[in-house]
Amino acid sequence: RVKRKMTPDEEDPDAFLYRTGDAPAKVGIEPKIAEKIADSWRQAKAAPEIIVAKTQADIPPAVVKQMAKENAMGAKGFYNLKDNKVYVIPENNEDARDVALTLMHEIVGHYGLRAVLGEQYAQVMRQAAKNSEVQKQLGQRPASERNVEEAIAEISERAVDDKLPAPARGLFN
């Protein structure tokens, strides 16, 4: 499992990084479909533990509290920095593709980024903040480590068609 000391930007021990949408899902997706997509990721050697919550009520209370504090109650998924687990919330995802994007965002853009960078995380985030693509994705958000990481995670979603494990691609094509 990936273990990394939190940076000063993440001092809250209950730090969570979310994938949210423009609006809550109108219907959501069945948990069993989300499980199939998660299973395709679980086959990867370095995959984090992936939790498919049946409903938002099934996620840890500390996460719900933090989501409310950060106005992220409709989050599609999140990466828990404290336990290195990725969660997906099917009822907040529109369809299988949305679940795939959520997992790409959380696994590649958060868990994977931190796993690869380790102790160099802060330095790389400072360098990445200068990248034109990251700056474009940041928009009006300040270039904090967390926002830069979020921008990179958002950019990673664009690669879903090419980089997603083959079994998951077939679920929404």
Image (cartoon, rainbow, N blue to C red):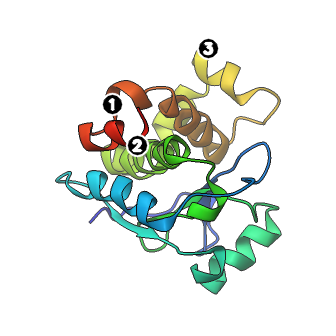
Q: Which mark is residue 108?
A: 2
Q: In the image, 132: left or right of 52?
A: right
Dot 2 lies on which element?
Answer: helix
Amino acid type, callout 3: Ser
**Looking at the figure, which quarter contains the N terminus?**
bottom left
In the image: residue 36, left or right of residue 44 = right
Q: Pinpoint residue 30: horizontal percent, then vertical percent.
A: 52, 63
Q: Position of residue 6 (x, y in %)?
A: 50, 62
The residue carrying mark 1 is: 163
Measured as percent of width and height from the top left, residue 74 is found at 74, 60
Q: Residues within 10 Å of mark 3 (few under 14, many from 20)?
A: few
Q: Which residue is mark 3?
A: 132
- Along the line of sight, the residue nearer the viewer: 73 or 167: 167
- Looking at the rendering, which quadrant does residue 173 occupy? top left
Query: Residue at the location (33% across, 43% down)?
Result: 168
Q: Amino acid at mark 2?
A: Val
* Whether residue 140 is situated above or below residue 82 in the rendered picture: above
Residue at the image position 61 percent from the left and 75 percent from the top: 55
In the rendered image of this protein, does residue 94 appear above or below residue 90? above
The picture places residue 95, in percent across and down from the top left corner, at: 56, 47
Q: Nearer the viewer, mark 2 or mark 3?
A: 2
Q: Earlier in the sequence, mark 2 or mark 3?
A: 2
